[in-house]
Amino acid sequence: MEKICPDAWLMNYTNPMAIISWAIDDYTKVKNVGLCHSVQGTSAELASYMGIPKNELSYWWQGLTTWPGS
């Protein structure tokens, strides 16, 4: 990417997201953004902790995915 498309951005949607993004920043000149994919799982887990159905939990996030079936 540094040679072929130096103005492009790498969108990292893989595990371990943070470590990969840090390595790209530290060892390359590639512009990148790490995208978290655990919002859905975390929100379901939080709803479970609170003893409410996940569809009753309200929250905001921005990303590439939506809740399955929504």
Image (cartoon, rainbow, N blue to C red):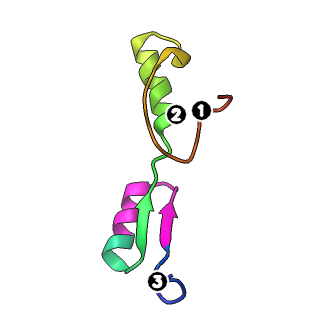
**Residue that carries the numbered disc 2 in the rendered image:** 40
**At 49% from the left edge and 75% from the top edge, which residue is drawn?**
8
Q: Secondary structure at mark 2?
A: helix
Q: How many marks?
A: 3
- Report x, y in % for residue 46: 42, 22
Q: Residues within 10 Å of mark 1 (few under 14, many from 20)?
A: few
Seen from this angle, which residue lies furthest bottom?
Answer: 3
* Earlier-in-chain disc, 2 versus 1: 2
Q: Secondary structure at mark 3?
A: loop
Please state which of residues 31 and 19 is positioned toward the viewer in this rendering: 31
Q: Is residue 18 above or below residue 58?
A: below
Q: Is residue 46 above or below residue 37?
A: above
- Report x, y in % for residue 28: 38, 80
Q: What's drawn in magenta, residue-wise? A: 9-23
* Earlier-in-chain disc, 3 versus 1: 3
Q: Is residue 25 above or below residue 39?
A: below
Is the C terminus in the top left, top right, bottom left or bottom right quadrant? top right
Please state which of residues 62 and 17 is positioned toward the viewer in this rendering: 62
Circle 3: residue type: Pro
**Residue that carries the numbered disc 1 in the rendered image:** 67
- 58 left or right, relative to 22: right
Q: In this rendering, does residue 20 appear at all?
A: no
